[in-house]
Image (cartoon, grey):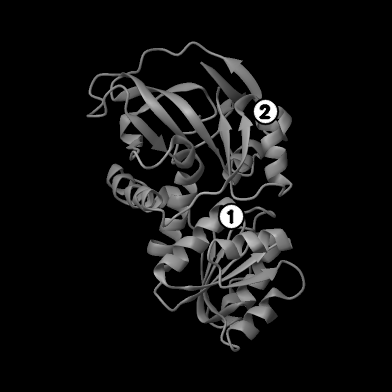
Amino acid sequence: MNSIRIEAVGGPAVMQWHDTTLPPPGPGQVRIRHTAIGLNFIDTYHRSGLYPLPMPSGLGLEAAAVIEAVGDDAGLLPVGTRVGYCWGPIGAYATHRNIAAAMLVPLPDAVSDEAAAAGLLKGCTAEFLIERCARVQAGDWALVPAAAGGVGLLLVQWLKYLGATVIAVAGSDEKLVLALAHGADHALLDSGDVAAHVRRLTGGRGVDVVFDGVGKASWESSLDSLKRRGLMISFGNASGPVSGVDLGILARKGSLFATRPTLFDYYATAQDRAAYAGRVLALMASGALKLAINQRYALADVATAHTDLAARRTTGSTILLPR
């Protein structure tokens, strides 16, 4: 098998191509052959050291695959089953790997390998943020910064599916057109006073919830966009992490709530993964969630993919192809 490894944290150049002999799967494991691999912002956090990893390490949390061999006590997934995963363990940047069968979910026929690799992590992120963290109801107002990104477009679609009113924020007119095409009700350029425009659109009230994957650059604006007792969900660090926060700011801006959730705490058990990932895949299969796979890179070109992602030259979802 071939895999991408890092010996130390740093820029895209630290990712190196490795050839490895893979042992047979152990008890409870299966050997899988990846058919498509998801690229996500969290991969850049692992590579850069923002989210520390023991070294050396692989990279990547999400992929679609086919089971090629089954170890003892590995459950009911037979050889040939199409599967996906997006909650680790880290090491998806590879052509093959051994992995615990309990970490996999079978893919429905109506969801392609590329769609699963592009959308499972982002879809599961949208699911837990909207349905179990914010508990969005029909009629709620939601603000989505970076709405033209992979997670952003799925957030927009899922919020509209539930009957929310969605204000999308993005960095260019082209990206705003993309967000509107995926269901956003209003679109704002990420320049000037976003919060003032939000107040105008909501009649001075503010939004019920902000889904902010940008981080440092949008923190103040997102807080200022919320209604009294609104919910700030900070789930990403695309512009850098939010730090040095004075907790009293939540009181001064209207007794706000704030949370910094991670997918891994909402998909902690096999039961969670089966139930909630199953819901994501069902919505993908039905067409309620549409994936925009706008970039494809060979796995060997992953450094270029990371560079383009960090520079915001990508829209929608991006996949890596191991072949």
Looking at the picture, how far across and down is residue 129, in whole percent? 45, 60
Q: Position of residue 255 (x, y in %)?
A: 52, 81
In the image, residue 280 sits, relative to residue 202, either above or below, namely above
**Considering depth in this image, is 249 or 89 the residue closer to the camera?**
89
Check the picture and name the quadrant holding the C terminus.
top right
Q: Is residue 21 above or below residue 126?
A: above
> With respect to residue 249, does 19 lie above or below?
above
Find the distance from the CA under tag 2 to the CA under tag 1. Answer: 25 Å
Q: Amino acid at mark 2?
A: Asp
Residue 123 or residue 80, whichever sits in front = 80
| Residue 128 spot, x, y in % from top left | 41, 57
Which mark sits nearer the N-terminus, 2 or 1? 1
Q: Is residue 231 left or right of residue 223?
A: left
Examine the image and state in which quarter residue 48 appears: top right
Viewer-closest of 125 and 219: 125
Q: Dot 1 corresponds to which residue?
A: 236
What numbered label is drawn on residue 102?
A: none
Front residue of 95 and 88? 95
Residue 171 seen in render: no
User: Compared with residue 232, is residue 10 higher up or lower down, i.e. above or below?
Assistant: above
Residue at the image point whose x is 46% and y is 57% from the top: 126
Give the class, few, some or many, for how many residues have Cα within 10 Å of label 1's Cα (few <14, many ≥20): many
Few, some or many residues within 10 Å of mark 2 (<14, 14–19, 20+): some
Helix, strand or loop at disc 2?
Answer: helix
The residue depicted at 46 percent of the width and 73 percent of the height is 164
What residue sits right under mark 2 in the picture?
A: 301
